[in-house]
Image (cartoon, rainbow, N blue to C red):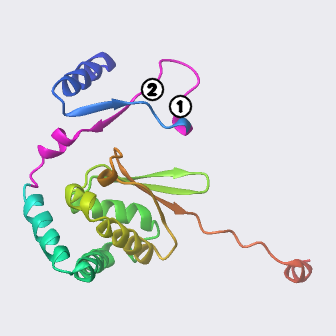
Amino acid sequence: MTPAGIRRHLDSLIEDGILEEREPHSRSVRMRGRPSKVFVMSDLGREQFEHSYDDLAVSALRFISSQGGDHLVAGFAKQRAEEISKKSEVEVRPSKDRARALAKFLTKEGYAASTHSHGVGVELCQHHCPIAHVAAEFPQLCEEETKAFAQILGTHVQRLATIAHGDGVCTTFIPQPKKQFPNATERKKRK
């Protein structure tokens, strides 16, 4: 496709309400050329994906919570995260590039995930979230999922954005391991 053809398709998706056009984050703004835009899927666009079971899940969790079961909702979120960890174990653990392996696993699970390297780490982006409407009301799901990512990757991670909170993409930052610099004693031994 030509760039003009891609722009026509994007304009059509925006007109139909499937995509929304946004300004890029300041860190990704280019200095020369045509101003860049970011396109994210709208709520209407997400509804095109089959996840009408959201209403049932939200109703069930609301009922449990209203009956004094906030601890049960938290327990459910934790159990769901543990299931993600167990299912991903085979694919992610042996991999040298765990972040990329996790993105591949998440894509299979319906999250359309990708990774992007940055100087001090990697961003794991989930472009679709099959539980976004449930997680919007019950953020425990996102919190436990973040903990599961840290466990799977064997390092601290930081959630920067979530679709459930209105962001276009769920973004998790994975810092690079710190390089070990030899201390004074080790430097003397090497000489």
Q: Secondary structure at mark 2?
A: loop
Q: Relative to residue 141, is residue 38 drawn left or right? A: right
Residue 53 percent across, percent down from the top left: 7, 60
User: In the rendered image of this protein, does residue 26 appear above or below residue 52?
Assistant: above
Q: Quadrant of the C terminus?
A: bottom right
Span of residues in magenta: 27-51
Residue at image location 42% in from the left, 78% down from the top:
151
Kind of residue at disc 1: Val
Real-space CA distance between mark 2 and mark 1, rounded to the nearest whole angstrom = 7 Å
Residue 150 percent across, percent down from the top left: 44, 73
Residue at image location 55% in from the left, 28% down from the top:
30
Kind of residue at disc 2: Ser
Q: Secondary structure at mark 1?
A: loop
Residue 122 percent across, percent down from the top left: 50, 57
Q: Nearer the viewer, residue 108 or 132?
A: 132
Q: Relative to residue 22, is residue 64 drawn left or right? A: left
Label total for image: 2
Whether the magenta-drawn stretch holds residue 44 is answered as yes
Disc on res. 29? 1
Q: Earlier in the sequence, mark 2 or mark 1?
A: 1
Q: Residue furthest front?
A: 67
The residue that label 2 is drawn on is: 36
Decide: few, some or many residues near mark 2? Use Cα within 10 Å; few <14, some 14-19, many ≥20: some
**Do the residues under discs 2 and 1 have CB atoms within 8 angstroms?**
yes
> Quadrant of residue 39 in the image?
top left
Whether the magenta-drawn stretch holds residue 88 is answered as no
Disc on res. 179? none
